[in-house]
Image (tube, rainbow, N blue to C red):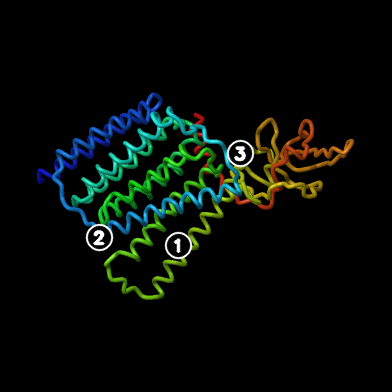
Amino acid sequence: MKRDKLRIYLVELFLIISLLLALFVSNIFEKRVLALIILPIAFLTKFLVKKKKAMSFYSRQVTLLMTGFGVIYLMVFYLMGIYFGYYKSPTPFGFNTIINFIIPFTIIIVSSEYIRKSLIIQKGKLSMILLTISMVLIDLVIYAGVYDVFKLDDMLTIVGFILFASIACNLLYNYITYRYGSKGVIIYRLLTILYAYFIPYIPDIYIFFRSFLRMLYPYIIYLVLEYTYSKANYAVAYKDKKYNIVSTAVLVVLMSLLIALISCQFRFGILVIGSESMTGSINKGDAVVYEAYHDQQLEVEDVIIFYKDDIKTVHRIINIDNLNGEVRYYTKGDANVNIDAGYVTKDKIIGVTMFKIKYLGFPTLWLRDIFEH
């Protein structure tokens, strides 16, 4: 093994080990500490790794284009907030925010991209894999203190919002850095991460929509760059191009519909049944698709979703009463002997079930059982 490659592997392994150790102490880990770890590793890379000239075709154009992509991302993100609403940033711009967030994030981004630039130009699949793992770990360490990895919902958020999105982004950053340099990537990352500390209001968008956007957007950027600046000969049959475009569009539509259902923030939603109170008509492990309730007419025999003691419950309406203008719905589980205690008012109703998908919810229930035990 050549000495240069050995040095590269040592740097990458040292970075990975440092980040893995950081994950184990994420409860006391801060962004400032992460910055203090990555910065010396960047200097270590400068002295240990022999510099090679990277490909820089269209470097200036791509830098400007990535700046534009960053601005477009923020515009789309904030336009989505018109529908979802906004919330006030928990870290408003100020001296403490500069010290605790803006400066550490800037150091992390610039240092990690310097490491990427130094290592990406070295050939070798193993080196590329180790580099990608280390860059993804940086994202995981940053968010590790925010989520509890022993809770299912937080774990799904880490996997969906951080891990998959980070892999998609870092594959794009590897591609851009290798071909066009790191300036565009640095500017893009600074724009799409630091905005939250300069703009006082942030779109209140369901986290998996944000995850999907973070996974889809890098692919769009890659297609634009590949078809605009790549010197490869695209002598591909028109039918093949059309097939790729159509298949990608279908996948995007299906993913959008799935996330829309899971988020339950639109007209329709989906809910996994976790009890046996409706066995016979809706069984445990089934998933029900429902229409959100907006004062539509409800009748006896309708199966509704409502809050009961802050828990989403799916039961059937067996009687409706109107007392002094207040409509009261009395419910019962099909498999239960007794009627539900009390009654349900309109403000507690989430939606009206439309149809069920058998067995779809079992994976979620199995995962929940694992985390609860």
Q: Residue furthest left?
A: 2
Task: Specify which label sits upstream in the sequence, 3 or 1.
Answer: 1
Residue at image point 43% right, 54% down? 217
Residue at image point 29% right, 64% down? 230
Vertical position of residue 103 compared to residue 165: above or below: above
State the mark number for residue 57. Answer: 2
Residue 257 rendering spot, x and y as whole percentages: 56, 55
Residue 365 rendering spot, x and y as whole percentages: 54, 39
* Residue 366 falls left or right of residue 276: left
Label 1: which secondary element: helix
Q: Amino acid at mark 1?
A: Thr
Label 2: which secondary element: loop
Q: Label 3 to label 2, Cα distance in Å?
A: 56 Å
The image quadrant that residue 24 belongs to is top left
Residue at image point 41% right, 58% down? 220
Task: Specify which label sits upstream in the sequence, 1 or 2.
Answer: 2
Q: Which residue is mark 1?
A: 248
Quadrant containing the N terminus in the rendered view: top left
Label 3: which secondary element: loop
**Mark 1 near mark 2, Cβ–Cβ under 8 Å?**
no
Point out the frontmost of discs 3 and 1: 1
The image quadrant that residue 240 belongs to is bottom left
Q: Which residue is mark 3?
A: 274
Q: Amino acid at mark 3?
A: Gly
